[in-house]
Amino acid sequence: MARILILGGAGGIGSATAERISARGDAVVLAGRTEATLMARAAALGAAHRVVDARDFDALERLVGELVAEPDGLHGIACCVGSIVLKPAHLTSSADFEAAIATNLATAFATVRAAGKHLSANGGSVLLFSSAAARVGLPNHELIAACKAGIEGLVRAAAATYAPRGLRINAIAPGLVDTPLAQRITQHAKSLETSRAMHVLGRIGRAEEVASLAAWLLGPDATWVTGQVYGIDGGLGVARAQG
């Protein structure tokens, strides 16, 4: 039985991924910054939970080291931490920039760093999250596109670095997904209508759809997959809806 650490495990995609992994009989450890939320979600899954700020390189490294040293070990990490920032560059403050970099790119880098130090002895899987915005130009997405494009570069470089040690690094690049993180868009009728129209399939995604791919990449059937960024985005990253 494998054990997977899910950072942002109480969020929409993180929680759905944990459900998928638990359903196939593997163990999950949910991690995040808010213990009350984690406890409730972990209790529902019968899973363990740990409080950690994934932006803190040292704290995350300690947690991964502790889990690896436990009898059940650790076989994979999913970094489901991120943010949605919709502003043109000229309206983006330095505080906006620093917060987005910390929440998106720094957490991804910290995850790879911790995995490289502790998981690479026995191999395993790391899953990061990009965005369709890193693949196609979308108005007002400059900041999030920059963060997520950095993650895609990280995936390819880290995959090359750690492949000899059996550590696989992949990412998923979703379109807009119906999660609590996206509520500012999904709860606004006009914004939701616009977002639906941007996706060729005519709707936004569901967390469980992304989780199905996440669970596969973190599981035993994907052991020959590394350095990949998979779009699961209703066609947003590659096609345009008919006018």
Image (cartoon, rainbow, N blue to C red):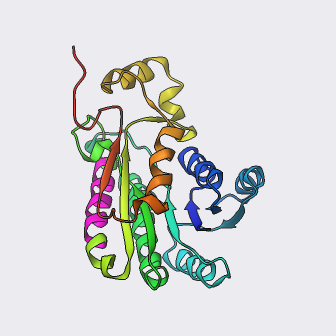
Q: Quadrant of residue 159?
A: bottom left
217 or 16: which is nearer to us? 217
* The C terminus: image quadrant: top left
Q: Residue at position x 47%, y 82% from top?
A: 122
Q: Is residue 32 visible?
A: no
Left or right of 177? Residue 156 is left
Prevailing secondary structure class for the magenta stretch in the rendered image: helix
Tally of marks? 0
* The N terminus: image quadrant: bottom right
Q: What is the x, y in percent for residue 231?
A: 32, 44
Question: Which residues lie in the magenta part?
Answer: 145-158
Q: Quadrant of residue 197?
A: top left
**Does residue 47 sit above or below 58 in this rendering?**
above
Q: Residue at position x 41%, y 18% from top?
A: 193
Q: Is residue 170 visible?
A: yes
Q: What is the x, y in percent for residue 109?
A: 39, 69
Left or right of 19? Residue 118 is left
The residue furthest front is: 221
Q: What is the x, y in percent for residue 2?
A: 59, 68
Q: Residue at position x 54%, y 40% from top?
A: 208
Does the magenta segment cover residue 146? yes
The residue furthest top is: 243
Q: What is the x, y in percent for residue 6?
A: 57, 61
**Does residue 154 sit above or below 138 in this rendering?**
below
106 or 79: which is nearer to us? 79
Q: Residue at position x 37%, y 56% from top?
A: 171
Does the magenta segment cover residue 187? no
